[in-house]
Image (cartoon, rainbow, N blue to C red):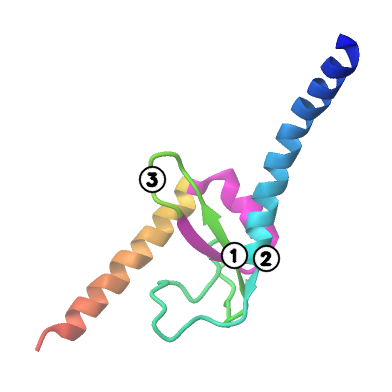
Amino acid sequence: MKTPRLLTLAALLALVPLASAAAESKTQKSNGKSAEASPADDYPLKTCLVSDEALDGDFITYTHREPGKPDRDIRFCCEGCIDDFKGDPAKFLKKLDAAKAAARKRAETKKKP
């Protein structure tokens, strides 16, 4: 009687990592290709963070998650660039942060009379 229960429990535990990987993949795809950026969009880059190819309103949004930090939406031209980003996220996040700082500085300059 105990053997079927143990086998069922073992099978369920084996599926947990698979479900987790599927959830991450689904998150990437559910964010999916966005048709166009909104006019009030504050994303600082018009190019892919990894390849520097023009996004031209057609891009994949990936939500980068780090424990203890807010989630960040990042735009890529293709799923391959997401994989490259995951290889060294700090490098690419530094580039994104620099672009945001430059955009903020330009906006402040425009506000001054």
State which mark lies toward you, 2 or 1. Answer: 2
Where, by quadrant of the figure, is residue 19 drawn? top right
Q: CA distance from mark 2 to mark 1?
A: 9 Å
Where is mark 1, residue-wise? 51
Q: CA distance from mark 3 to mark 2?
A: 25 Å
Where is mark 3, residue-wise? 69
The question of residue 81 being in magenta is answered with yes
Quadrant that contains the C terminus:
bottom left
Q: Is residue 6 left or right of residue 108?
A: right
Q: Is residue 9 left or right of residue 84?
A: right
Mark 2: amino acid: Cys
Tell which residue pokes out farthest to the top in this image: 2
- Location of residue 5 with respect to 104 vertically, above or below: above
Circle 2 crowding by C-alpha within 10 Å: few under 14, some 14–19, many from 20: some
Asked if the residue at tag 1 contacts the one at tag 2, i.e. Cβ–Cβ closer than 8 Å, the answer is: yes
Tell which residue pokes out farthest to the front in this image: 1
Query: What kind of element bears circle 3?
Result: loop
Give the mark nearest the N terminus, 3 or 1: 1
Q: CA distance from mark 3 to mark 1?
A: 25 Å
Name the residue rendered at 45%, 57% in the picture.
72
Q: Is residue 73 left or right of residue 16?
A: left
Query: What kind of element bears circle 1?
Result: loop
The question of residue 106 being in magenta is answered with no
Circle 1 crowding by C-alpha within 10 Å: few under 14, some 14–19, many from 20: few
Mark 3: amino acid: Lys
